[in-house]
Image (tube, rainbow, N blue to C red):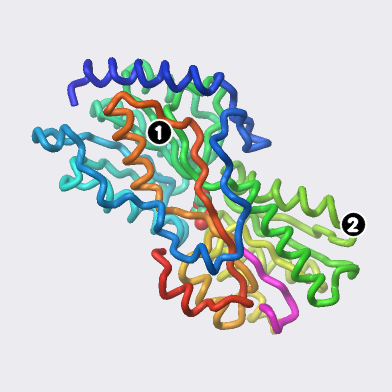
């Protein structure tokens, strides 16, 4: 698209968007901005929410510019390839932003480093892309580079994790999971589960393998769980350490927890891959986990391998975080192209899954 036309459309769209959202700031510690769109429904037990690709408008009409032979160039600054969730997210962008659909995608894998993402954004600016999409590795430290994008007239869309910036006109929109709510859903599930096991009043020792420190998914899930801990005086958080959202680091952290504490009842893993590592560490230490084991293991994301782990009796529950943001971001871009207003903050509905469910049939329907 021609830069000038795009800029004019954008100014119009941005004006409309800011009128509706009051310029409120996304506070990193609450994850609940004032201009939030209708919040997702309460997390439902998952049997009726099993098909996890329902939000994907894959047959959306190709961009106008595609019809006229011009592609919309999108630079995607991806976090890395640290987890199954991330792989599914990358795949979602690559299969959505195709030439066939009217796009040219420039994909950058930052290997979990903010400095690499900043470099990628600068390179997108230099290449004069039409849109920049960022899944920011951490929440802070983005103002300067976003100002540069704004000055170049290139709209920025955030996806997955959030940025904590003082001026929310630095980005057009954000789409992702409600991480605080995911953490709270986890705490509520645990309370019910322990109650059902007759352990509602028992002293419960927990450890948390956190995600990358400072990433929205870490900040929100830790906060959500902390909110629930405050409601249960018999729950004790013994320790929290980062497993960087990877299986290898998750295993390492769990090994060290098992050396330091001999009475761990619950391990909260801030993503599924960390749980796979933690389960290996638990088994290697001669302990058992899962519904029939010594240690309760729960995690976030609900990737296919987490269903296999639950079916194998290792993992107790997983709290969903949907990675299929490619079509959602494409929809935002199409609206901006058409000069329409976009909702600034767009949460995705998410469910949870545990071993009381018909996991085999749910797994058969899973898209990631
Ligand atoms: O939970 C984890 C990935 O930001 C929601 O990042 C995402 C998280 C996801 O590495 O597996």
Magenta stretch: dominant secondary structure: loop
The residue lying at 44 percent from left, 22 percent from top is 17
Q: Number of numbered discs present?
A: 2
Q: Relative to residue 70, is residue 174 drawn left or right?
A: right
Q: CA distance from mark 1 to mark 2?
A: 41 Å
Question: Toward the viewer: 237 or 333?
Answer: 333
The answer to whether residue 205 shows anywhere in this view is: yes
Give the SS element for disc 2. Answer: loop
Crowding around mark 1 (Cα neighbors within 10 Å: few <14, some 14 to 19, many 20+) is many
The reply to whether callout 1 and callout 2 are in contact (CB within 8 Å) is no
Crowding around mark 2 (Cα neighbors within 10 Å: few <14, some 14 to 19, many 20+) is few
Res 183 label: none
Give the SS element for disc 1. Answer: strand
Magenta stretch in the rendered image: 289-299
Q: Position of residue 227 (x, y in %)?
A: 77, 48
The residue lying at 23 percent from left, 29 percent from top is 127
Q: Does any atom of ligand 1 lie closer than 8 Å to the CB of label 1?
A: no
Where is the C terminus found, in terms of image quarters?
bottom left
Question: Toward the viewer: 20 or 112?
Answer: 20
The answer to whether residue 113 shows anywhere in this view is: no
Question: Toward the viewer: 90 or 127?
Answer: 90
Q: Position of residue 296 (x, y in %)?
A: 71, 72
Q: Which residue is mark 2?
A: 233
Mark 1 or mark 2: name the one nearer the start of the chain. 1
Q: Position of residue 289 (x, y in %)?
A: 68, 78
Q: Is residue 216 above or below residue 7?
A: below
Is 297 colored magenta in this rendering?
yes
Q: Is residue 136 above or below residue 14?
A: below
Question: Toward the viewer: 89 or 33?
Answer: 33
Is 357 colored magenta in this rendering?
no
Q: Position of residue 343 (x, y in %)?
A: 46, 32
């Amino acid at each position: 698209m021609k830069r000038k036309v795009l800029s004019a459309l954008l100014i119009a769209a941005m004006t409309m968007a800011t009128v509706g959202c009051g310029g409120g700031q996304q506070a990193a510690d609450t994850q609940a901005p004032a201009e939030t769109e209708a919040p997702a429904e309460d997390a439902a037990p998952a049997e009726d929410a099993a098909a996890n690709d329902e939000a994907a408008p894959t047959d959306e009409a190709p961009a106008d510019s595609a019809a006229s032979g011009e592609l919309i160039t999108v630079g995607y600054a991806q976090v890395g390839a640290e987890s199954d969730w991330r792989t599914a997210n990358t795949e979602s962008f690559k299969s959505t932003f195709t030439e066939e659909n009217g796009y040219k995608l420039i994909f950058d894998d930052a290997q979990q480093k903010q400095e690499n993402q900043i470099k990628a954004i600068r390179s997108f600016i230099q290449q004069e892309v039409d849109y920049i999409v960022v899944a920011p590795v951490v929440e802070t430290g983005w103002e300067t580079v976003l100002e540069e994008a704004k000055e170049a007239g290139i709209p920025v869309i955030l996806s997955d994790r959030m940025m904590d910036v003082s001026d929310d006109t630095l980005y057009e929109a954000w789409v992702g999971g409600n991480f605080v709510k995911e953490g709270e859903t986890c705490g509520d599930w645990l309370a019910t589960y322990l109650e059902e096991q007759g352990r509602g009043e028992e002293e419960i020792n927990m450890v948390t393998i956190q995600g990358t420190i400072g990433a929205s998914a870490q900040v929100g899930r830790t906060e959500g769980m902390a909110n629930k801990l405050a409601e249960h005086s018999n729950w004790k958080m013994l320790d929290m350490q980062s497993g960087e959202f990877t299986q290898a680091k998750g295993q390492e952290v769990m090994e060290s927890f098992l050396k330091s504490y001999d009475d761990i009842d619950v391990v909260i893993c801030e993503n599924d891959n960390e749980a796979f590592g933690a389960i290996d560490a638990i088994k290697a230490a001669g302990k058992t986990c899962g519904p029939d084991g010594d240690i309760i293991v729960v995690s976030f994301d609900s990737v296919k391998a987490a269903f296999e782990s639950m079916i194998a009796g290792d993992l107790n529950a997983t709290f969903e975080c949907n990675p299929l943001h490619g079509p959602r971001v494409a929809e935002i871009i199409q609206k901006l192209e058409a000069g329409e207003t976009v909702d600034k903050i767009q949460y995705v509905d998410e469910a949870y899954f545990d071993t009381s469910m018909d996991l085999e049939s749910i797994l058969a329907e899973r898209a990631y």
